[in-house]
Image (cartoon, rainbow, N blue to C red):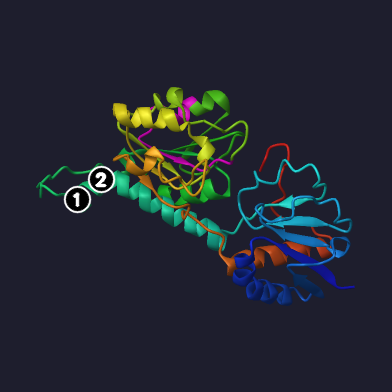
Amino acid sequence: MSINILFAAQADRWTQYEAHLRRALDETGLDYAIDTEMPPEEVDYIVYAPNSDVQDFRPYTRLKAVLNLWAGVEGITGNETLNVPLTRMVDEEGLTQGMVEWVTGHVLRHHLGMDAHIVNPDHAWDKTIPPLASERVVTILGLGALGSAVAGMLRHLGFTLRGWARSQKALDGVACHAGEDGLDAALSGAEIVVLLLPDTSDTRDVINARTLALLAPGAVIVNPGRGPLIDEADLISALDSGQLSHATLDVFRTEPLPQDHPFWAHPKVTVTPHIASETRPPSASRVIAENIRRSEVGEPLLYVVDRDAGY
């Protein structure tokens, strides 16, 4: 019997994904049908974006798994109608590599003080020499697939690295911390902080007045993770006081960022439009197809979400 796969996402995504998904599924050798519309009672798998029209999963009585197209799953974990396995997107070939490149670029920008040379209206001949990477403390909050990959690249460049996660991790070249006490240890004296945590009740507003005060004076925040990780008012206060010298922000509580939001006009804030990393259809399609293949032959699914933990 053919496996029926529903693609549930915004219409433009189907245009981007259809050919790649069909190619990847063809390579599995499975007999399948995939489309954007199917009778719910005939659907075996849903390739899913949380902003799709599918919000009630109860009609999908034959459903085996929901395969999220995004790394973030906070938009679906609380859906009480979903009672089958949910997987998140872990795409080392596309999404992870994109994140590594974006974070590395912005960390190096702030480490080397590039802004002073790129924007220099007074033609100042300032020969201030930046420290070497080994003399710069970079802390990564979140040591999952993305955080670990970013740490690996920054370690290769020689930075002094700290990391923090909810549970204890072990990464070569990274002083890893965990738990509430570990957060303070990871942040104390940090000069650049990279946020790669999921959005959960335990991580919201993790960057606030108290934790910002732990950083080295003039520290930098780089956030390609989730907007709710930061208390925005506290961040602006720290920028205005000089405790922070800059914040590079790719994600926000409301997206697109409203035109009248103070981040746009603040001289110490860089806004990027949620481009740090995007799911790439060719490689993401291979991840989806492999998980469907695994399910059909009785192998465990990859990247299953812990609904209680939220990721």
Location of residue 8 with respect to 79 vertically, above or below = below
Which residue is drawn at the image coordinates 16% and 49% (left, top)? 120
Q: Which quarter of the rendered picture does the C terminus lie within?
A: top right
Which residue carries the number 1 mark?
117
Q: Is residue 96 magenta?
A: no
Which residue is drawn at the image coordinates 45% and 33% (left, top)? 232
Question: Relative to 121, is 159 on the left or the right?
Answer: right
* Position of residue 112 measured from the top left corner of the image (x, y, whole percent): 27, 47
Task: Specify the segment rendered in magenta.
Answer: 184-198
* Position of residue 233 measured from the top left corner of the image (x, y, whole percent): 43, 29
Location of residue 151 with respect to 200 vertically, above or below = below
Q: CA distance from mark 1 to mark 2?
A: 8 Å
* Position of residue 238 measured from the top left corner of the image (x, y, whole percent): 36, 28
Residue furthest to the front: 260
Taking depth in this image into account, of 95 and 250 the one nearest to the observer is 250
Instruction: Check disc 2: other Cα within 10 Å, few if <14, some if 14-19, many if 20+.
Output: some
Give the label on residue 96, or none: none
Question: Relative to 125, is 165 on the left or the right?
Answer: right
Instruction: Check disc 1: other Cα within 10 Å, few if <14, some if 14-19, many if 20+.
Output: few
Q: For mark 2, give the secondary structure.
A: loop
Occupied quadrant, residue 63: bottom right
Q: Which quarter of the rendered picture does the N terminus lie within?
A: bottom right
Which residue is drawn at the image coordinates 64% and 58% (left, top)? 69
Report whether residue 60 is seen: yes
Q: Is residue 188 magenta?
A: yes
| Residue type at tag 2 | Gly
Location of residue 231 with respect to 121 vertically, above or below = above
Callouts 1 and 2 close, C-beta under 8 Å: yes
Which residue carries the number 2 mark?
113
Q: For mark 1, give the secondary structure.
A: helix
Occupied quadrant, residue 41: bottom right
Taking depth in this image into account, of 85 and 54 the one nearest to the observer is 54
